[in-house]
Image (tube, grey):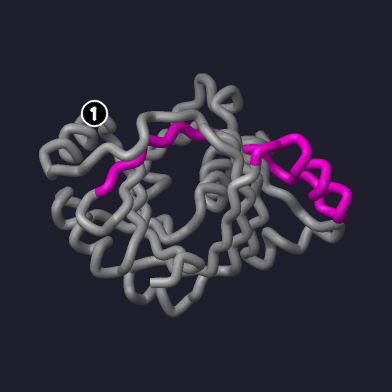
Amino acid sequence: MSKLVETEVKVFVPDRAAMLAQLEASGATLKSPRVYEHNVRYEDAQETLTASGIVLRLRQDTRVRLTYKAPPVEASRAEGVLTRFEAEVTIDDFETMDVILQRLGFHPYVVYEKYRTTYELGEAEIVLDEMPYGDFLEAEGSPEAIEAALSALGLHDRPRILTSYMALFERVKAALGLAAHDLTFANFEGVDVPQEIFRGAD
């Protein structure tokens, strides 16, 4: 599989402790301990990127990365996965890259945060993401590797989420009548997000 193609599946995790135990029991190998991520998504002057399914993102965790994602391949959804072109490069200066992007005509559009723990299970990369509105497991790799990992974790029959965290954010905001623009932990303090919101969120 090309390293410029991303194929993934998300599953909502209502019990993080149980999922961590299942990862250990399945033989998953910890690749990267829990780390905080700060993400900024950019838009062009006409704000056409998000509406077109394009992602231009600057991320900072233990390193800084600039990512471009093309719109998802719709046919992949019928196969139970989400596939899209993705190109990513590691850089060493978040602030300077932000200046470059803005000089090129892009502007920060939305900020989102999460904590991520990364594992390897078979040929798949498994991440446990703690989002401000809930916890999710994401499996990435070939379709075959994803299916094998989900089966090993007992998640094969769980409802699959084939959309982005920002799309889920919009779903949560609509369901709860929230006005927050950025997906931050501070904006979800004291907010109870019902699990039902994530059922059938594909």
Q: Secondary structure at mark 1?
A: helix
The quadrant the N terminus occupies is: bottom left
Pick out the residue farthest to the front.
Answer: 92
**Residue at the left extreme of this rendering:** 25
Instruction: Judge from the rendering whether residue 25 lies leftward or rightward of residue 117; answer left or right.
Output: left
Q: Position of residue 140 (x, y in %)?
A: 36, 57
Residue 148 versus residue 79: which sits nearer the camera? 148
Rendered location of residue 108, percent (x, y):
76, 44
Residue 164 among those drawn in magenta: no
Residue name at image x 16 percent, y 57 percent: 151
Q: Residue furthest bottom?
A: 75
Relative to 46, say whether 36 is above or below: above
Residue 26, located in which quarter of the rendered image?
top left
Report the residue at 45% width, 29% height from top.
Answer: 35
Is 141 above or below relative to 61? Answer: below
Above or below for 89 versus 49? above
> Is residue 195 among the parts visible in the rendering?
no
Does residue 69 appear in this view? yes
Q: Tell which of 63 and 185 is nearer to you.
A: 63
Q: Quadrant of the C terminus?
A: bottom left
Stretch of the chain drawn in magenta: 92-120
Q: Which residue is mark 1?
A: 17
Was residue 113 drawn as part of the magenta stretch in this picture? yes
The total number of labels drawn is 1
Q: Which residue corresponds to the image point at 42% horizontal and 61% vertical from the top-left?
A: 162
Picture coordinates of residue 77, whole percent (x, y) = 40, 72
* Amino acid marked by disc 1: Ala
Whole-percent x, y for residue 129 in the image: 40, 39
